[in-house]
Amino acid sequence: MLEKIVSVDQAFAVYMAQFRSSFTLRLFEMLSISGVSLSWFLVAGFLWGLNFFGVQLFVEQSVFLQSMLPSLVVWGLAYLIKRRVKRPRPYETPGMPSAKTNVSFSMDSFPSSHAASSFALAFTLLFVGSSLANGVLLWAILVGYSRLYLGVHFLSDVLGGIALALLCSWVAT
């Protein structure tokens, strides 16, 4: 079973590599960066500060801010899982194509923290019935796709992150 997953992952990574161009690499780098934990802390801090002063940028700002908590929790869980699994990234795997990207990587590959935290926010908003859910879900899909497109995660890494997000969001709501 594991061999089949690895085989599909590698075939999919090779398939994705054929669509890369310098323009789309830069575009997906920006999307990928939007899923980084520092971005999450900055947005949460900014929104919390606005709430503290009674300022609402959008109608569901408080719901959005509360829905970020499962995203931060799932980021930490993904970190712990990565340390345990220690799966190399696609570009570290012999025979896999490497993208020339400016996105930095400091940890192992499974699960994708970017996909996990992005989808946790989207699922939580979906589960609480927020009108923001569809837009955030589209963004999460693009963040997950960017990780595959940039060649920094295998398909199972992103799917594992999505599964972790679904579980954490379900437990949180």
Image: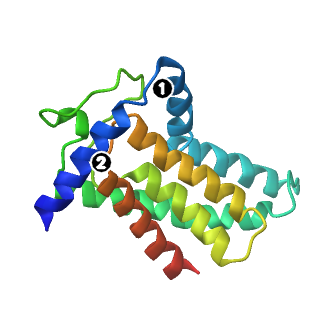
User: Which quarter shows the C terminus?
Assistant: bottom right
Residue shown at 54% from the left, 20% from the top: 23
Q: Which quadrant of the view contains residue 31?
A: top right
- Measured as percent of width and height from the top left, residue 99 is found at 34, 26
User: Which quarter shows the N terminus?
Assistant: bottom left
* Relative to 48, 100 lies left or right: left
Please rate how many residues cluster around mark 2, counting C-alpha atoms within 10 Å: few if below 14, some from 14 to 19, many from 20: many
In this figure, which residue is indicated by the disc labeled 1?
25
Residue shown at 38% from the left, 60% from the top: 159
Q: Which quadrant of the view contains residue 121?
A: bottom right
By what rule are the colours in the image chosen?
rainbow
Please rate how many residues cluster around mark 1, counting C-alpha atoms within 10 Å: few if below 14, some from 14 to 19, many from 20: many
Residue shown at 45% from the left, 53% from the top: 115
The first of marks 1 and 2 along the sequence is 1
* Relative to 19, 67 lies left or right: right
Which kind of residue does numbered mark 2 sit on?
Answer: Phe
Q: Secondary structure at mark 2?
A: loop
In this figure, which residue is indicated by the disc labeled 2?
154
Which kind of residue does numbered mark 1 sit on?
Answer: Leu
- Measured as percent of width and height from the top left, residue 52 is found at 80, 56
Residue 140 at least partly seen: yes
Q: CA distance from mark 1 to mark 2?
A: 17 Å
* Relative to 129, 21 lies left or right: left
- Measured as percent of width and height from the top left, residue 8 is found at 24, 54
- Measured as percent of width and height from the top left, residue 86 is found at 17, 51
Q: Answer above or below: position of 72 versus 93.
A: below
